[in-house]
Image (cartoon, helix red, strand yellow):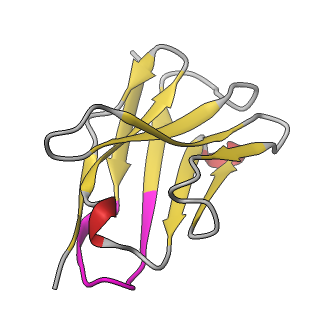
Amino acid sequence: QVQLVESGGGLVQPGGSLLLSCAASGRNFSATNMAWYRRAPGKEREFVATSGYLGTTLYNQAVKGRFTISRDNAKNTLYLQMNSLEPGDTAIYCCSIQEFWGQGTQVTVSS
């Protein structure tokens, strides 16, 4: 019933930008915290950023100042604007809302 679908990943050069989207369906999440996580090759899942339903945000120090999390409650969609991308940002990025997870979208930063 509930489905989260990420999109926007791809291959970019260092210093490039990507906008990730997480479209939720099956439930209204406007009053729910939403978050992005990532899993890099050979590493455990890592918290990236979270967006509170009142607009508060929290970031992993590794991405703070480069990434911006936002949401459009009318569209039931979560976003992650990623700027100044680095090779270390290469990972599968997944959105998380309550106990639900998306399948993820691949972000690869390489020359």
Establish if 70 lies above or below 74: below
* Horizontal relation, residue 17 to residue 62: left or right: left
Residue 103 picture location, percent across and down = 25, 35
Residue 41 picture location, percent across and down = 15, 46
Q: Is residue 19 magenta?
A: yes
Front in this rendered view, residue 83 or 61 = 61
Establish if 48 lies above or below 101: below
Residue 15 picture location, percent across and down = 39, 85
Establish if 66 lies above or below 90: below
**Residue at (46% x, 79% y) in the render:** 84
Front in this rendered view, residue 95 or 39 = 39
Stretch of the chain drawn in magenta = 8-20
Quadrant of res 28 = top right
Quadrant of res 68 = bottom right
* Horizontal relation, residue 110 to residue 24: left or right: left
Q: In the picture, which quadrant includes the N terminus?
A: top left
Front in this rendered view, residue 62 or 27 = 62
**Residue at (58% x, 52% y) in the render:** 61
**Residue at (67% x, 51% y) in the render:** 72
Residue 85 picture location, percent across and down = 39, 74
Seen as rendered, the residue at the extreme right is 54
Number of numbered markers: 0
**Residue at (26% x, 84% y) in the render:** 13
Q: In the picture, which quadrant includes the C terminus?
A: bottom left
Q: Is residue 82 magenta?
A: no
